[in-house]
Image (tube, rainbow, N blue to C red):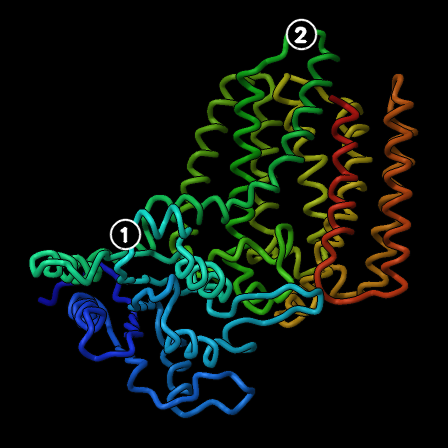
Amino acid sequence: MNEVPTHRRYRVLVIDAHPRADSFCQGLAAAAVEGFEALHEVRRLSLRELDFNLHHLGQELEPCLRHSQQEILWAEHLVIVHPVWWGSMPALLKGWLDRVLLPGFAFAEREDGGWDGLLGGRSATLIVTMDTPVWVFRWILRSPSIQALRAATLNFCGISPVRIMLFSPVRHASSPQRQQWLQQVRQLGAQLEKKSHNGWQARCRAWLQAMRPQFYVFPWLALTAGAVNASASNGTAFRWSTYSLCWAAAWLLEFISVLTNEIHDFKTDTANRNSGPFTGGSRVLVQGLLREPELYTGRRAACGGLVIIALLLAILLIDHKPQILGLLITGLVLGIGYTAPPLKLVYRTLGELNVAFTHSVFVVLLGHVSQSGGSGLQPWMISAPMFFAILPAIILAGFPDLEADASVGKQTLAVRFGRPFAAKAAMGAAFIAAIMHTCLTVGPGFWMDTVILLHASALMIALSAYMRQPHAGRINGLLMLALSYMVWFALAHL
C-alpha cells in the first residue's frame, strides 16, 4: 500500500547568480538542489550560463530570458544564491533582474499611479555570501543588497515572504565551517513549508491580513451605541458580561463574512488592479499567503465559537432568548450569503443593502438586546440614519473594483448602473442620513448635527466633482471621506 505524503510538494527554482563556476555559491546552490529534490520538484537556473545583454535598452528578450520568465512562472518558491560585492549584488544578477522582471510580467502600473505585483503566490529564500562581518552588514551598512532584492524587487513584484540566510566571512572560513553551512542549506527542503509558509510570524501576519481589522471598528461603535442607549432607557447598570459576548459574536460574524468573501471572490480579486485597504479583498489567496482549505478551517472554527457564544447568551438572556438567537442566525445567513451561494446577494445588486443593514440595524439591535432592551422604536431610530450613512462608503467601495467585478458577473450597484448613477445614489444616501439624524435625534445634539451636516456637504461636493469626471482606479480620498462620515452617526449616541 502506497503511503500518502504528509507534506506538500512545492515547485522550487534554484537560481545560481555567481559569475564564477568554482565559487562557494555554486556549492551552496548544489546543496540547495540536493536538499529540495528529496521532498519537492526542483529546477536549477545558472545565470552565468545564459547568453544575454545585461543592459536594459528596450530590446527584445533573448530566448534564455523568455525561458527564465517561464521558469519563474512555474515556480512556487525561488532560491537565489549570490555573493555580496561592494555591499550589493553582482552585475550579472542585477542585469538579469532588469531584463526579466518587466512591466506586464512582474508588475503592473495602475491609472492612479500605483502598482500591483503580478508574481504573488510565491515565496523566496536568499542565500547570501560575503566577507563583511554580518553585524557590520546589518547594523552599520543596513543590509543594502537585502533591502534592494527583498523589499524593492521581490516584495514589489508580489513575492512574499522572503527568508534570508547570510554566510560570512567566507574567504577564510575553515572546511568544517563550510560543511556546516552546506548542511544548513541541505535542510531547507524539509523546512520549506514550516519556514517559508507556516512560520508563526508569517502565519500571524497572513491571518491578520485575512481578518481585515479595519472593518471591525464601526460595527463595534454601533453595537456599543445600541447597548448604551438600552441601558440608559432601562435605568439599570450596564451589563458588561452580555455586552462582551455580543461584541465577540459580532466580531466572529464579521470574521466569517470576510473569510467567505475571500473564498468566493478569488476570481475578481485576481483580476483586480485597484485593490486597497477597503477594496479588492485581503488578497491572502491571490498572494498565496493562505490556502483555501485553511480559510474554510478558519471559518468552521469561527462558526463553532459563535455557537458557544449563542448558548451562553441564551442562558444569560433567558427572557430574550428568541431575539438573541434570531439575530445571530440572521447575521450568519446575511454574512455568508453576501457572496456565497445560494443567496449571492452581491451578485443580485443587494450587496450594498446587506452590508448597510448588518453594520447598522443588526449590530444596534444586538447591542440593545445585550442590555435586555425590550421592543420599541429606540434602536430603529438610532440605526435608520446609520443605515443611510453607511451606504455611500459601501457604494463607493465598488468603484475601484468595477471592471474586475463585471468580469465575473458580480452585479454591484456600480456595475449594474455605472459609476455616475452610483455616485448620485451615494450622494442621496448621505443627504437622507443627515436629515434623518437631525429629525430623529432627541436631546441637545446641536453641535453633532452641525458636524454631520458639514461633513455631508463636503462629501456631496466631492461626489459632485467625481461625477464630472468619473474614472477607474483608486479613489482613496473620496472613500476615506465617506468612511469617516458614517462614524459620526455612532458617536452621536455614545
Residue at (52% x, 42% y) in the render: 255
If you read the primary sequence from the N terminus, does the residue marked by circle 2 or circle 1 appear first?
A: 1
Residue at (69% x, 30% y) in the render: 222
Q: Between 208 and 318, which is closer to the camera in this rendering?
A: 208
Between the C-alphas of marks 2 and 1, the distance is 67 Å
Q: Between 135 and 205, which is closer to the camera in this rendering?
A: 135
Q: Amino acid at mark 2?
A: Thr
Is residue 19 toward the left or the right of residue 376 in the image? left
Residue 59 drawn at (x, y percent) = 53, 90
Q: Tag 1, which secondary structure? A: loop
The quadrant of the picture occupied by the N terminus is: bottom left
Mark 2 and mark 1 in contact? Answer it, CB < 8 Å. no
| Residue 292 seen by the camera | no
Residue 256 drawn at (x, y percent) = 51, 44
Q: Tag 2, which secondary structure? A: loop
Q: Splitting the image into 4 quarters, where does residue 265 fall? A: bottom right
Considering only vertical position in the picture, is 86 above or below 168? below
Residue 301 drawn at (x, y percent) = 40, 41
Is residue 488 toward the left or the right of residue 165 in the image? right
The quadrant of the picture occupied by the C terminus is: top right
| Residue 79 seen by the camera | yes
**In the rendered image, which residue does mark 2 sit on?**
236
**In the rendered image, which residue does mark 1 sit on?**
133
Q: How many numbered tags mark residues here?
A: 2
Q: Amino acid at mark 1?
A: Pro
Q: Splitting the image into 4 quarters, where does residue 124 fall? A: bottom left
